[in-house]
Amino acid sequence: MESNKIVKNEPFVSIIIINFNGGNIVHECINSIYETVLNRFEIILIDNKSSDNSHQKCKKKWPKIKLIQNNENIGLTARNTGIKEAEGEFIVFLDSDTLVVEGWLENLIKSFKENGDGLYQPKLLEKKRPNIINSAGNMINILGMGFSRGKGEKDEGQYEKFQEIGYTSGACTFTSTEIIKKIGNINKIFFSYHDDLDYGWRGWLQKIPSYYEPKSKIYHLGSPTLKWSAKKFYFLERNRWICLLYLYSTSTMIKIFPILIFLEIGVFFYFLTKGYGKEKFRALISIFKLRKQIKCNKNKIKELKNVSDKEVIKHFVNDFEFPSNLVQSSSNITNKVIKFLSKLSRTIIKI
């Protein structure tokens, strides 16, 4: 049954969900929304040509859902269709593999009203291990590496402070429709992964901050389609370089390019140890093929940019955290090297 608990004087919220063969997972996600949300809301379900009929099953159970069916799988760019169709004062990008709990949306709205314009992320906990952190705010390293703070750690209240972060997780990003209009659409160049890092970075270029609100909590399965695979490594590494090449100014890239190449050698050998060396080459080839598109994106960013790279980098970190459940003995050494290179980059840029 659809919820009958809606409080009519609350702001209207558009919840955008992308589905691709979501099966019971997307069903559970939508059901949790109807069970918990007190605000007036709409669900915009965008299906990327699923073959399991999961989207139709959801529409049948919840007829009020706005169902949009794509003729092909266009990845996370599908959110742009949702943005276009959204009627809400606020918008939520919500992954189909999440479960929301009571107060999740109300606390995000309250935090927005108290702290002002920005992109907001809740505390993300693992769906299968509810006491394990999935993300306590996402961070951007000065070398373009994004990571989920606290990922894999046991949740013992160590991340209960509202604070500024590098960028919000694509699993759940909340903001006003006005902010979405300012930052713009999801960049179609990415398809999957680092689209959220790009979005947060573009926000900083327009003086729009990202925040972590721990009073809001949701549960996230994470990578239900690709998991930790060669394809995921390919997208992560390819898209990291796309962000660097078009979001940093040319002068900044020239200054830190030698450091990035040094890091690149290390990343390549790391890929080799994981059996993904071929994916690294594929990523480089793809970047070369996309060079005209990257240049076009860079020119568009110049027109929107309100602050210098130096100002943006002040919101980036030097560290890089490997998920604690994946940490190996070599990870601490790798972290130290990345931190050293990041500090060196900051010195060269003169921040």
Image (cartoon, helix red, strand yellow):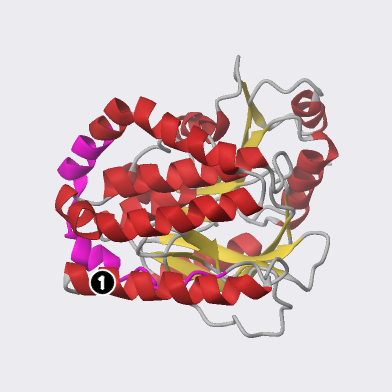
In the image, residue 249 sits, relative to residue 149, either above or below, namely: above
Q: Residue at x 66, y 51 (%)?
A: 274
Relative image position of residue 127 (x, y in whole percent): 78, 59
Q: Is residue 194 left or right of residue 246?
A: right
Residue behind mark 1? 346
Relative image position of residue 333 (x, y in whole percent): 54, 75
Range of residues picked out in magenta: 297-321
Q: Residue at x 27, y 57 (%)?
A: 258
Element on which disc 1 rests: helix
- The kind of residue tagged 1 is Arg
Q: Nearer the viewer, residue 172 or 58?
A: 172
Q: Is residue 66 magenta?
A: no
Q: Residue at x 57, y 37 (%)?
A: 278
Q: Nearer the viewer, residue 265 or 304?
A: 265
In the image, residue 59 sits, relative to residue 187, either above or below, namely: above
Relative image position of residue 87 (x, y in whole percent): 48, 37
Assign the N terminus to one quadrant of the image. top right
In the image, residue 348 sits, relative to residue 1, either above or below, namely: below
Q: Is residue 162 left or right of residue 220?
A: left
